[in-house]
């Protein structure tokens, strides 16, 4: 127990702590070093006044909400399919894992070329199929670009969540379904009264984890839109990067990071409160 | 319900499932198919409207060039393997011990600590990179395998602990009590009783740790120089400011995914078992 | 010591002019440090981009024997850290933030004022012979607060590139020489799914970002960014006219332009023959002749940028070498930079890798002029103004300015509104820096 704690402290807690301290300071380059001066709440005051922060916050919340909904929804469907007797073949599980195995760097560039407004293959395929008349600039308009990034992120996130839910499905004892059928339950009723309650905890865990990862999305924005056009696809994590690394405003970047952390922490507590009461109880007909 | 109607319903249900599976496979593999296809095309075939898939667009040159720089390739694969392998082993060793300790603690404290552990995941990596870089520089761990392992552990260890804690909590105490009666110490109990029956979640954690470490780019690029370049860094090098060697990048990315996929194939049975008993109960 | 100072992997040499240095060189450059064999030699550490971006001998494949000879002569060993371009700025920022010595020589592109506190002023260290052979204006982007901190090593200016076949088919005999001709030709060339103009407006900041493109038009209209006090003065007629030109061009601009995040995306469109004209850097010339990646081999023309009310103007790509403040061997580092800028190395730079030299004597060399056919155009462009307006908050300024330009291009704001908002924001940024 102790070694793990030590490693965690050195590698995780110190940088986090340093970063929190940084958010109360202003950093300037002077004479070959960075100087740190205490400015207390200035960075946070700036946070509230900054238009970019409000845009990023709005986009991040929108993106996270839809990302989690879509990922968990699709993953659940996939898990159900793979739990069916047709889907039991190992090949499906291997196919499932492939997006997860792809390096995020290459994933970003791949989607960039697929979605390109002029020579992207998505446009070519859709035009061939007759679904669109003219090429669409998928990343050119903020709301459309956000939805395309959702597509790419959902595609990459489904494998892990689907595995989680599939495991939960396989944990459900068969006799519950048999009992339900004996009572005359239809497929839909079986799903509602047997499957969903048993999946309550796995779904909750999936939602919490995916929310954290969605809120922190970075690679896709960096490669696909850099927050543009016109700051339309700006999100909090990318804004923190931009402020820290492009503007070298370490203090302000740390403040934004704390904002991200604060929001996620609150959301996580809300979720956990929601699932704690009412742990799954076995049903006796 | 009459027999024929039941059969008809069955048929409908089966069709839905088969269609569903088909859609799933197409949706998952479409970008991958394009990726592999692109790695066999000249770049000039990829910039036309629509992409030019005629015979003279295809080439092996992308893979050829990637293989020619085999020194760099082998170097990167070796580094990634060492770092990911090391991270996985250490995460398992430390994580299982920590998870076991947490599992046997009083419940409220255990859950609270678990929440703290989860909270470390919530901090965006972007901003802790600079303090982390300073820490590593002070310990002279920049551009070393050990340094990278430490960094990867920082975001792998919490999840591993979380998964394993859930599983350990579900083990019936009778087993451990029996061992204690036989005179085993806590550690012996852990090693000889608990671990052997925990192979599935251990494998699951291992696969997760390996994939996350193998694919990490952000930390790797900042914390390494020339000695411990990893595979994701290698792939990113195809992207220049003025030119991007798209075909070669995808060829390298295809090669880079292979080890991960092979490991996942080998351990696919264990992945499922592991997740079911570990994370769920957490 | 007779043992060779350069250790290398077994990759055969190839000329850049076939475009095969693409990533072949990118991967090949992850080699062992040069001259590591001799422990008595002084070690120099260099941070550089990867080929085919502008890179020195040892990273890009040219002048290797000369480099080996230099290492032996000066009893030095050079350790290269070659990094993919997008990560360069992040890496150096992190290194500087840690305060420890990492590199002696660092490549910079428009970041000199930003990092001037971490660099050694080298104005006095440059030999007079070298200084005389460099254009004076090339020093403007590496000078800050009275000190010269770097040396630009390649002449990289934006010029006009166009598809000769498209222009011929439309009956246009010469590339546009004025703003009006630019607009007119772009309109004529936009038909049948093809567009007259393409560019990358997707990333607002940095050199080569949306803001910097507007700055070329700003100068062509006779305007400039800052006044003597450092505060913005661009919110005037030239500024608005410049932005208005870009807006007027939008109907004839390939729609993907607004989301093209890097120059690569826009270059691809021109190389596919689906757009007719664009602004680009000198590397474009060789890139278009590479038949593996281009469909317009032999059909590319180059000219100076069309003249606005005040004539033609451009911006400097400003690829420069600098020396860090905490380098233990600044004199040796300077010698290395002078080696990179020596006559022979500069000549081989263009002949083997396609990046134009900065030395005036090399640019006027007949062999160079024949081999690099666009050298004459770039030289011509260099006789017009090419100010990049680099300041310590260049990133923040171009981010905000570029974003306003993007909004204007998308029709969300008028040119006047966008520039006013930009001017207010930039004033705030500059004031914050000046007044602490």
Image (cartoon, grey):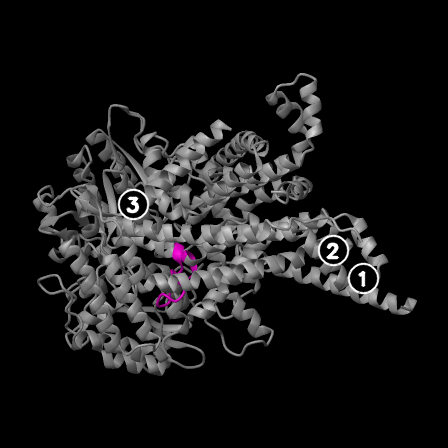
Classify B140 as above or below B267.
above
> How far apart are the two marked residues, 1 and 3, measured between alpha carbons?
59 Å
**In the image, residue A229 lies in the stretch drawn in magenta:** yes
Furthest toward the top, the residue is B183
| Residue behind mark 2 | A194
Q: Nearer the viewer, mark 1 or mark 3?
A: 1
Say which element carries label 1.
loop
Label 1 marks a residue whose chain is A
C23 or B105: nearer the eye?
A: B105
Are the residues under marks 1 and 2 on the same chain?
Answer: yes
Give the mark nearer the N terminus: 1 vs 2.
1
Say which element carries label 2.
helix
> How far apart are the two marked residues, 1 and 2, measured between alpha carbons?
10 Å
Are the residues under marks 3 and 2 on the same chain?
Answer: yes
Q: Within 10 angstroms of label 2, few (less than 14), some, or many (20 or more) residues?
A: some
Q: Whole-percent x and y of residue A198?
A: 69, 51
C110 or B207: nearer the eye?
A: B207
Give the mark nearer the N terminus: 1 vs 3.
3
Q: Residue A185 shows which numbered tag?
A: 1
User: In the rendered view, does C336 fall on the left or right side of B15?
Assistant: left
Contact flag, marks 1 and 3 (Cβ < 8 Å): no
User: In the rendered view, does B89 fall on the left or right side of C383?
Assistant: right
Label 3 marks a residue whose chain is A
């Amino acid at each position: 127990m102790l070694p793990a704690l030590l490693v965690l402290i050195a590698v995780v807690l110190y940088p986090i702590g340093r970063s929190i301290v940084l958010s109360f300071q202003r950093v300037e380059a002077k004479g070959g070093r960075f100087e740190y001066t205490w400015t207390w709440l200035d960075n946070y005051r700036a946070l509230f006044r900054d238009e970019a922060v409000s845009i990023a916050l709005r986009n991040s919340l929108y993106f996270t909400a839809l990302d989690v909904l879509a990922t968990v929804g699709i993953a659940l469907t996939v898990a159900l399919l793979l739990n069916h007797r047709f889907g039991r073949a190992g090949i499906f599980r291997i196919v499932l894992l492939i997006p997860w195995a792809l390096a995020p760097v290459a994933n970003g560039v791949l989607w960039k070329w697929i979605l390109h407004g002029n020579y992207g293959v998505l446009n070519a395929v859709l035009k061939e199929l007759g679904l669109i008349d003219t090429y669409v600039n998928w990343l050119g308009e903020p709301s459309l670009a956000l939805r395309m990034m959702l597509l790419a992120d959902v595609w990459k996130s489904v494998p892990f969540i689907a595995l989680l839910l599939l495991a939960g499905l396989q944990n459900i004892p068969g006799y519950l379904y048999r009992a339900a059928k004996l009572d005359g339950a239809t497929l839909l009723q079986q799903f509602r009264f047997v499957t969903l309650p048993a999946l309550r905890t796995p779904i909750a865990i999936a939602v919490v984890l995916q929310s954290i990862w969605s809120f922190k999305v970075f690679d896709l924005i960096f490669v696909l839109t850099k927050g543009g056009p016109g700051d339309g696809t700006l999100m909090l994590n990318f804004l923190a990067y931009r402020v820290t690394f492009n503007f070298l405003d370490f203090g302000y970047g740390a403040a934004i990071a704390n904002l991200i952390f604060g929001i996620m922490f609150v959301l996580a507590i809300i979720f956990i409160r929601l699932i704690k009461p009412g742990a799954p109880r076995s049903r006796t007909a | 319900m009459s027999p024929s109607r039941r059969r008809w319903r069955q048929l409908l249900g089966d069709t839905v499932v088969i269609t569903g599976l088909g859609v799933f496979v197409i949706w998952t593999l479409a970008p991958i198919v394009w990726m592999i296809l692109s790695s066999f095309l000249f770049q000039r075939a990829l910039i036309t409207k629509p992409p030019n898939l005629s015979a003279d667009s295809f080439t092996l040159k992308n893979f050829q060039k990637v293989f020619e720089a085999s020194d760099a390739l082998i170097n990167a694969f070796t580094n990634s393997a060492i770092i990911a392998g090391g991270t996985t082993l250490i995460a398992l060793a430390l994580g299982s011990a920590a998870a076991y300790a947490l599992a046997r603690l009083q419940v409220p404290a255990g859950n609270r600590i678990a929440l703290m552990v989860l909270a470390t995941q919530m901090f965006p990596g972007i901003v802790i990179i600079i303090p982390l870089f300073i820490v590593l520089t002070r310990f002279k761990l920049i551009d070393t395998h050990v340094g990278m392992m430490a960094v990867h552990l920082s975001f792998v260890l919490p999840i591993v602990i979380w998964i394993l804690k859930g599983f350990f909590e579900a083990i019936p105490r009778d087993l451990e009590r029996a061992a204690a009666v036989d005179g085993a110490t806590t550690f012996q109990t852990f090693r000889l009783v608990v671990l052997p029956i925990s192979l599935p979640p251990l494998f699951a954690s291992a696969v997760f740790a390996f994939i996350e470490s193998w694919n990490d780019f952000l930390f790797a690029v900042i914390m390494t120089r020339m000695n411990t370049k990893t595979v994701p860094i290698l792939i990113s090098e195809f992207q220049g400011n003025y030119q991007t060697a798209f075909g070669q990048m995808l060829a390298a990315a295809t090669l880079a995914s292979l080890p991960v996929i092979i490991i996942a194939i080998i351990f696919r049975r264990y992945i499922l078992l592991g997740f079911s008993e570990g994370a769920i109960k957490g | 010591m007779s043992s060779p100072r350069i250790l290398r992997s077994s990759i055969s040499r190839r000329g850049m002019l076939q475009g095969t240095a693409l990533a072949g060189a990118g991967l090949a450059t992850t080699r062992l440090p040069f001259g590591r064999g001799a422990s008595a030699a002084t070690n120099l550490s260099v941070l550089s981009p990867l080929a085919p971006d502008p890179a020195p001998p040892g990273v890009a494949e040219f002048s290797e024997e000369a480099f080996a000879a230099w290492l032996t002569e000066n009893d030095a060993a050079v350790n290269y850290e070659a990094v993919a371009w997008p990560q360069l700025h992040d890496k150096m920022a992190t290194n500087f933030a840690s305060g420890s010595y990492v590199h002696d020589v660092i490549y910079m592109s428009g970041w000199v004022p930003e990092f001037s506190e971490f660099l050694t002023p080298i104005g006095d260290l440059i030999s007079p012979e070298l200084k005389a052979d460099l254009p004076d204006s090339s020093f403007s982007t590496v000078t800050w607060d009275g000190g010269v901190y770097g040396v630009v090593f390649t002449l990289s200016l934006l010029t006009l590139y166009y598809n000769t076949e498209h222009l011929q088919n439309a009956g246009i005999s010469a590339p546009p020489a004025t703003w009006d001709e630019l607009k007119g030709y772009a309109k004529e060339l936009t038909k049948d799914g093809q567009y007259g103009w393409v560019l990358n407006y997707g990333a607002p900041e940095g050199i080569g970002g949306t803001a910097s493109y507007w700055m070329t038009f700003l100068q062509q209209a006779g305007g400039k960014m800052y006044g003597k006090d450092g505060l913005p003065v661009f919110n005037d007629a030239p500024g608005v006219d410049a932005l208005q030109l870009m807006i007027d061009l939008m109907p004839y601009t390939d729609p993907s332009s607004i989301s093209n995040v890097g120059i690569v995306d826009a270059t691809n469109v021109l190389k596919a023959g689906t757009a007719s004209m664009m602004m680009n850097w000198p590397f474009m010339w060789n890139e278009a002749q590479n038949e593996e990646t281009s469909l317009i081999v032999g059909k590319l023309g180059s000219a100076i940028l069309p003249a606005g009310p005040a004539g033609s103007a451009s911006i400097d790509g400003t690829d420069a070498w600098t020396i860090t403040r905490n380098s233990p061997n600044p004199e040796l580092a300077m010698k290395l930079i002078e080696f990179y800028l020596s006559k022979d190395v500069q000549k081989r730079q263009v002949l083997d890798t396609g990046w134009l030299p900065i030395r005036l004597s090399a640019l006027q060399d007949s062999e160079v002029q024949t081999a690099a056919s666009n050298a004459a155009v770039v030289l011509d462009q260099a006789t017009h103004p090419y100010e990049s307006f680099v300041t310590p908050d260049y990133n923040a300024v171009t981010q905000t300015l570029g974003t306003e330009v993007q909004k204007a291009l998308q029709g969300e704001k008028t040119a006047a509104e966008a520039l006013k908002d930009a001017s207010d924001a930039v004033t705030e940024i500059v004031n914050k820096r000046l007044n602490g």
